[in-house]
């Protein structure tokens, strides 16, 4: 089955700086890669996703890149703000519904 | 405001007791997932359904866990008997399938003592 690895497990950045979280996946059939943000006491919420026919996608301060050859994808957050502090999860699926998550990154924005 | 609703939000029970967690998926969604979240294991997929039929429950301990969808508006996850190692946050999520967004509920925090 699919195996998704995520790094780093914790990340602290100064407010205004950029944050990058990286994930690798094992199943070459995976074609959908969402990123979720989880705040304390809440369920994960989708922030951005990318499909395998696209190399990069951007939404305001958030961007995701995908390298299918290397089987890795990354989340980039620019101009970080205190409200970006949360746990971020990457995930992968081959479209057969089985969404496999990475182990999460706890991002802390230092004011 | 469409959302996935889970009940109860918190449950404390004694070892050996039966626990039932309920989920109301977003109206119109045909795919329902159950995930378990712990510090050690992260988000584990326990089971998922498409059009109320179970597609995969290989992540679930079969001897004590069961998941069902009695109708399109209700999904249940049952543990019988419960054990301390079942303590975790259980999330239900729903979506339209085919590699699209899964919407998560607020979770049920289960503590088995």
Image (cartoon, rainbow, N blue to C red):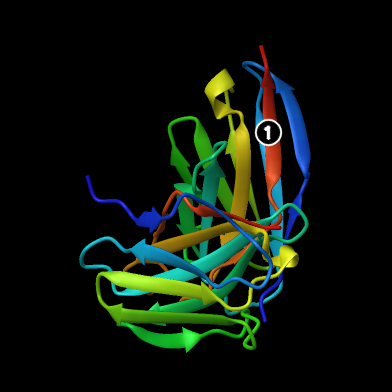
> x%, y% of residue B87?
67, 59
Residue B39 in the image: x percent, y percent? 74, 52
Counting every numbered tag in the picture gives: 1
- For the N terminus of chain B, the image quarter is top left
Q: Residue at x 46, y 47 (%)?
A: A45
- Between B24 and A73, which is closer to the camera in this rendering? B24
Q: Chain of mark 1?
A: A
In the rendered view, would you say A50 is above or below A18?
A: below
Viewer-proximal residue among B39 and A20: B39
Quarter location, residue A59: top left
Measured as percent of width and height from the top left, residue A55 is found at: 53, 56
Report the residue at 65% width, 27% height from top: A18
Q: Is residue A54 visible?
A: yes
Q: Quadrant of the C terminus of chain B?
A: bottom right
Q: Residue at x 53, y 49 (%)?
A: A36
Q: Is residue B78 left or right of residue B93?
A: right
Q: Residue at x 61, y 50 (%)?
A: A89
In the displayed structure image, the side of residue B113 where residue B35 appears, left or right: left
* Observer able to see residue A81: no
Question: How crowded is the residue under tag 1: few (<14 C-alpha within 10 Å), some, or many (20+)?
Answer: many
Disc 1 marks which residue? A107
């Amino acid at each position: 089955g699919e195996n998704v690895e995520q790094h780093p497990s914790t990340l602290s950045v100064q407010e205004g700086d950029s944050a990058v979280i990286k994930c690798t996946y094992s199943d070459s059939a995976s074609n959908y890669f969402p990123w979720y943000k989880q705040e304390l006491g809440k369920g994960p919420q989708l922030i951005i996703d990318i499909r395998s026919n696209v190399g990069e996608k951007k939404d305001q301060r958030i961007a995701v890149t995908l390298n299918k050859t290397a089987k890795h994808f990354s989340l980039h957050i620019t101009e970080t703000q205190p409200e970006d502090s949360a746990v971020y999860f990457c995930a992968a699926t081959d479209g057969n519904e089985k969404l496999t998550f990475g182990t999460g990154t706890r991002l802390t924005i230092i004011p | 405001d469409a959302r996935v609703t889970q009940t109860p939000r918190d449950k404390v029970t004694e070892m050996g007791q039966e626990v039932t967690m309920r989920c109301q998926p977003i109206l119109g969604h045909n795919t329902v997932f159950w995930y378990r979240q712990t510090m050690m294991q992260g988000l584990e997929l326990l089971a998922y359904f498409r059009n109320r039929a179970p597609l995969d429950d290989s992540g679930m301990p079969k001897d004590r866990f069961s998941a069902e969808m009695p109708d399109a508006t209700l999904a249940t996850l049952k543990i019988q008997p419960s054990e301390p190692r079942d303590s975790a946050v259980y999330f239900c999520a729903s979506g339209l399938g085919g590699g699209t967004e899964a919407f998560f509920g607020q979770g049920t925090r289960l503590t088995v003592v």
